Amino acid sequence: MTVNSDSYALSLASISPAMLALAGGALLALGLLVIILLLRSASLRREQAEEASFRAGETEARMAELLKIQAEMQGRIAAMTEVFGARQSELNQAISQRLDGMSQRVNSTITEQTKSTHENLQRLQERLAVIDAAQNNIQTLARDVVGLQAILSNKQTRGAFGQSRMETIVADGLPMGAYAFQQALSNGSRPDCTIRMPNGAPPLVIDAKFPLEAWNAIRDAGSPEAGKIAGQQFRRDLEVHIRDISEKYLIQGETQETAFLFVPSESIFAEIHENFEALVQKAHRARIVIVSPSLLMLSIQVIQAVLKDQRMRAQAHLIQGEVAILMDDLGRLDERVRKLQGHFAMAQKDIDMVVTSADKLTRRGARIEALEFDAGGEVKPARDSETAAKSVESRTGLLKLRVVDEE
């Protein structure tokens, strides 16, 4: 401690008076600065206090305003609460009513849907029963188709199938004796059917053979190239068949100038006319008509009408004789009716004369009855009109009865 004091004293002694004066001025300036700062801080605190008091007043005013607004808000909230409560009760009531209505509608809808579902299930069961029956029919048809396929796989059997259809159509449409099957011609060929035409005309020839294997090759072709090749083969086979019919069955003076080529399927007939028009035209030029079952049936009906007309013309003289006999019978009937009419006229005339005589007698009896004579022969007055009328009526009735009895 002593060492420090000594060192401090030595340091003060070493400082010059100028420096001391400078240090004193600095200290004085520093003190003034401190005083100024203190004054400024006091005024600043006073301003802050005033500002704080002003702000406190404003805050109190705002708080009062806020309290007022809060009170108004509380009143409005209370009013809105009451309104919302009333609205909520109305809304609850409306919702309950709508829920009741919706529940009723839902119940009715569910009832209707249940009834409709039951009816639909019943109809579905009926349809399923129909479908089961149809499925059984389809299975039966499938077995028939398999059998038909087995039939068509054999060429001879297939020819017999087409000929069977043709024979059925002809036999159903024409009377016995108007057609013949497999009848030999003068050249030794035997067409499938010949139909006798009226008036001694040559018979019409029908061929039931058809190149079905070539057609099946077209249907079974898996590519356009194979279909084209099969179509060419079918065209060649049908051309050969048309030429054979023209050469074998069209005989001058023995058969008709036109023959029928029977196709046993309407679909094949339609596709031939649609896709092989040149073959159809070639057949027409060769006087061969390609016919389907419906066209053959129509042709048979036309031939039947022609045959019926021919039989009518053949029996025309018999019909005329019967008509002449019928006219004679009508003449005799007219004569007898006229005689009977004359008898009736004479009888009517006699009846009129009898009625006239009866009227005269009635009137005369009435005049006699209206007069009365006494014992001296004097005429008494007539009875009253009512008694006289009754007497006349009674006498007239008796007279009429007598007339009827005499008749």
Image (cartoon, helix red, strand yellow):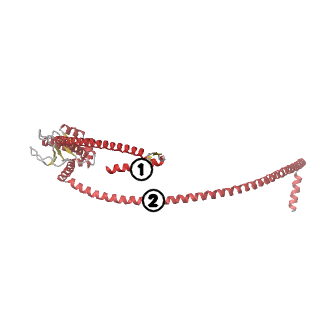
Q: Amino acid at mark 2?
A: Glu
Q: Nearer the viewer, mark 2 or mark 1?
A: 1
Q: Split into 4 quadrants, where in the image is the N terminus?
A: bottom right
Helix, strand, or loop for circle 2?
A: helix
322 or 110: which is nearer to us?
322
Q: Say how many tags the image has.
A: 2
Q: Position of residue 174 (x, y in %)?
A: 20, 47
Q: Give the residue pinned by disc 1.
A: 394
**Left of 189 or right of it: where is 346?**
right
110 or 150: which is nearer to us?
110
What residue occupies the far bottom of the structure in this picture? 1
Q: Position of residue 129 (x, y in %)?
A: 37, 60
Q: Callout 2: 10 Å neighbours few (<14), some, many (20+)?
A: few
Q: Amino acid at mark 1?
A: Ser
What residue occupies the far top of the structure in this picture? 285
The image quarter containing residue 309 is top left
The CA distance from mark 2 to mark 1 is 84 Å
Q: Earlier in the sequence, mark 2 or mark 1?
A: 2
Q: Give the residue pinned by disc 2.
A: 119
Helix, strand, or loop for circle 1?
A: helix
Q: Position of residue 259 (x, y in %)?
A: 17, 42
Q: Callout 1: 10 Å neighbours few (<14), some, many (20+)?
A: few
Q: Is residue 239 above or below residue 78?
A: above
Image point 50% across, 58% down: which residue?
Answer: 113
Q: Position of residue 227 (x, y in %)?
A: 25, 45
What residue occupies the far front of the structure in this picture? 376
